Amino acid sequence: MKKYNFYSGPAILPQEVFQQASKAVLELDNIGMSLIEISHRSKEFVAIIEEAQQLVRELLQLDDDQKVLFLGAGASMQFCMIPFNLLGENDTAAYLETGVWAKKAIKEAKLFGKVNIVASSAEQNFNHIPKNYSVPADSKYFHITTNNTIYGSQLHAIPESPVPIVADMSSDIFWKPIDGKKFGLIYCGAQKNMGPSGVTMVVVRESLLGKVSRPIPTMLDYRNHIKDNSLHNTPCTFAIYVSMLTMRWIKKMGGLTAMEKLNEEKAKILYDEIDANPLFNGVIAKEDRSRMNVTFTINKPELEEEFATLAKNAGCIGIKGHRSVGGFRASIYNAMPKEGVQVLVDVMRDFANKKG
Ligand SMILES: *Cc1c(COP(=O)(O)O)cnc(C)c1O
């Protein structure tokens, strides 16, 4: 039976990317060697990383000041690397607190400077995105999490900000067209919507760097990674290659406009069912619902296990909600086909007909 991977990350990637990647593991482009044994400084790999950077530039419409880096240690490392590079001891950074990942970013920033939480939905268990706040013009930067993977909420408009916006796009990078030029820094762990685990993409404006006076360890200083084109040390070559293949696939499918259309269609199928089905409830305020991670609960908690088993038996894998929210979460990233969402919706409908 066909299985559909609804896990939040590592997550589904296009089937043809898996096929191309497995071929390259055996032999890369008829060079007589595997992708995973070649030097990161070989001309073959340099061509791969340059194509990956070029694809990011095209997809996000970047300008020359914005540099594309592929770094290690996950999006979590960026929580400290960003304030290390951008926030002086007496400076203040503004943060929007919209979920667990935002909280973790805030915790790290406090080690380096002052943090101003301009708005938070923590008291409502992050069931919506706060609005009607303002960002002080003397902030060094304004940090947002564009998609809250755990709670299933998403910012559907880039907020107004008088200072550079720093955005954690780990779980919604490339989900629709954006004007990347509007950002001071963008980062994402690849393993949700871009590629396999092992690499973190960072897009940083070079003109924001070099303004804090503290010493920065070599590997944590963006300037060194810019200078050495992400090859200061050995990067995760496999993850960069597979991310590049995934971006090629996005382009071939019609780019981010096509991704948006497909993602909106999939999300609508699922949210329509959640709203119509008497057994299920959405978790997040309607206007803030994520198109990537769809969270819902069941009205009769005693049926939770039974529904989870039925979904699994129908091929829907990984729909259990995060432990801090409970219920269910269906991650429907770019590579999730519409059929997968339809299978899940059919299980929900059958279940309500039997138990509702
Ligand atoms: C998963 C996730 C992270 C953490 O990513 P790692 O690469 O595991 O460190 C950070 N932010 C968001 C929004 C995420 O979804």
Image (cartoon, grey):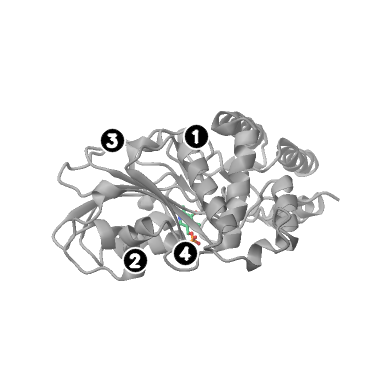
Kind of residue indicated by mark 1: Lys
Q: Secondary structure at mark 4?
A: loop
Horizontal placement of 150 versus 350: left or right?
left
Q: Secondary structure at mark 1?
A: helix
User: Can the viewer see residue 296 in this picture?
Assistant: no
What residue is disc 3 on?
132
Quarter of the image containing the C terminus? top right
Dot 1 or dot 3: first in sequence order is 3
Q: Quadrant of residue 100?
A: bottom left
Report crowding for label 3: few under 14, some 14 to 19, many 20 or more residues within 10 A (C-alpha): few
What residue is disc 2 on?
220
Instruction: Tell me the distance, in whole angstroms, between the alpha carbons under discs 2 and 4.
Output: 10 Å
Q: Position of residue 238 (x, y in %)?
A: 61, 61
Kind of residue indicated by mark 4: Gly
Instruction: Tell me the distance, in whole angstroms, between the alpha carbons under discs 4 and 1.
Output: 35 Å
Residue situated in front as seen by the camera: 56 or 306 = 56
Residue situated in front as seen by the camera: 267 or 112 = 112
Horizontal placement of 26 versus 1: left or right?
left
Kind of residue indicated by mark 2: Leu
Residue that sits furthest to the right in the current view: 1
Instruction: Tell me the distance, in whole angstroms, between the alpha carbons under discs 1 and 3.
Output: 17 Å
Marks 1 & 2, CB-CB < 8 Å contact: no
Q: Position of residue 315 (x, y in %)?
A: 79, 51
Instruction: Tell me the distance, in whole angstroms, between the alpha carbons under discs 2 and 3.
Output: 35 Å
What residue is disc 1 on?
286
Nearer to us: label 4 or label 1: 4
What residue is disc 4 on?
72
Nearer to us: label 3 or label 4: 4
Q: Position of residue 240 (x, y in %)?
A: 56, 56
Horizontal placement of 111 versus 219: left or right?
left
Kind of residue indicated by mark 3: Asn
Image height of 93 relative to 220, above or below: above
